[in-house]
Amino acid sequence: MALIRSVFQDELDGVSQSLVDLTDMVAVSIAKATESILNCDLKLAEEVIASDDTIDEFQHALDARIIDIIARQQPVASDLRALVTALRMSADLERMGDMSHHVAKITRLRHPDAAIPAELIASFKQMGEAAEKIANKFACFKRDFLSAPIWKAMKAVVDKTAAPKPCQIDYRKDEKFWVFPSAEDVSVTFEVNFQTVEDQSLARIFLLELNDSKRSVMNAPGVIYHDKTMPENVVRLFPGAMKARTSNGSITF
């Protein structure tokens, strides 16, 4: 069962990363389309038109992968909601890419003449910037989703309300982080995992230096590097953490 869950988590991570990649492509397309129509730039317009097929194919492949995951894994509750949300997000992103394609085609159609009247340039520029911001918001989805437990715990400290329960977040393959709220502060422990021996050695040197830096930096936040064993609170509340411990250990802020 643990292996099946691990495979499923890897697939969810892959979907999240694909959404970020799709967002990046759409954001670039929007920026280029906006610049092309504002500056009558035929070269940029052609680049946007050429990239539309790539965006469409990427989105269709992502949707097919999500539907396949739902069919095979039959997720429920939060996992199912996350996958359905990903389907909706990818569709919205694809439509944004189509709009960029449409704008670029107008630029090409009207070239070398201006595609929009001079008095509307400022408004169109604002619309393009707003669309790009929306696309970039999508890129923040995974970051905001993973950081939500930390934000919730810190808000409880600031508001002086009941602290949420400690939780474990599987944010990468073979890597987790744990959030430990209290009435006065929040500690977060990150598992650190590097695959190669060289990377492991460099990581250990860096983390040891980071751990020692608080001695010379005034008011530096507490940093504890656990090289050999996992922190006591992680082991006590999440017994499975010992089995998942990597050779790089963990670091607590």
Image (spheres, rainbow, N blue to C red):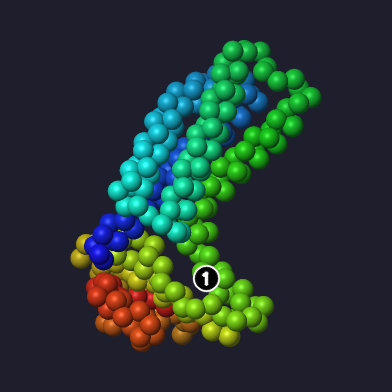
The answer to whether any part of residue 218 appears in the image is no
Residue drawn at x 51%, y 53% as measured from the top left: 141
Instruction: Give residue 243's position: percent from left, percent from top.
Output: 24, 75
> What residue is rendered at 35% in x and 71% in y?
191
176 shown above or below 9: below
Q: Callout 1: few (<14), some (14-19), or many (20+) C-alpha neighbours within 10 Å?
A: many
Report the residue that reaches farthest toward the right.
119
Q: Position of residue 52 (x, y in %)?
A: 46, 27
Q: Which quadrant of the figure contains the N terminus?
A: bottom left
Three-letter amino acid code of the residue under disc 1: Ile
Q: Residue at position x 33%, y 46% from top?
A: 71
Where residue 115 sits: x, y (%)?
A: 67, 18
Asked whether residue 140 appears in the rendered view, the answer is: yes
Could you tell me which residue is drawn at 26 percent across and 59 percent down? 4
Which residue matches tag 1? 150
Q: Position of residue 205 (x, y in %)?
A: 31, 73
Q: 245 and 39: which one is in front?
A: 245
* Residue projecting furthest to the left: 197
- Mark 1, secondary structure of its residue: helix
Q: In this orientation, which residue lies closer to the viewer: 236 or 103? A: 236
In the picture, measured across the screen, residue 106 lies left or right of residue 166, that is right
Q: Nearer the viewer, residue 29 or 88?
A: 88
Placement of 195 over or under 150, stated as above or below: above
Q: Quadrant of residue 133?
A: top right
User: Would residue 125 be found to the left or right of residue 168 on screen?
Assistant: right
Badge count: 1
Q: Is residue 172 above or below residue 161?
A: above
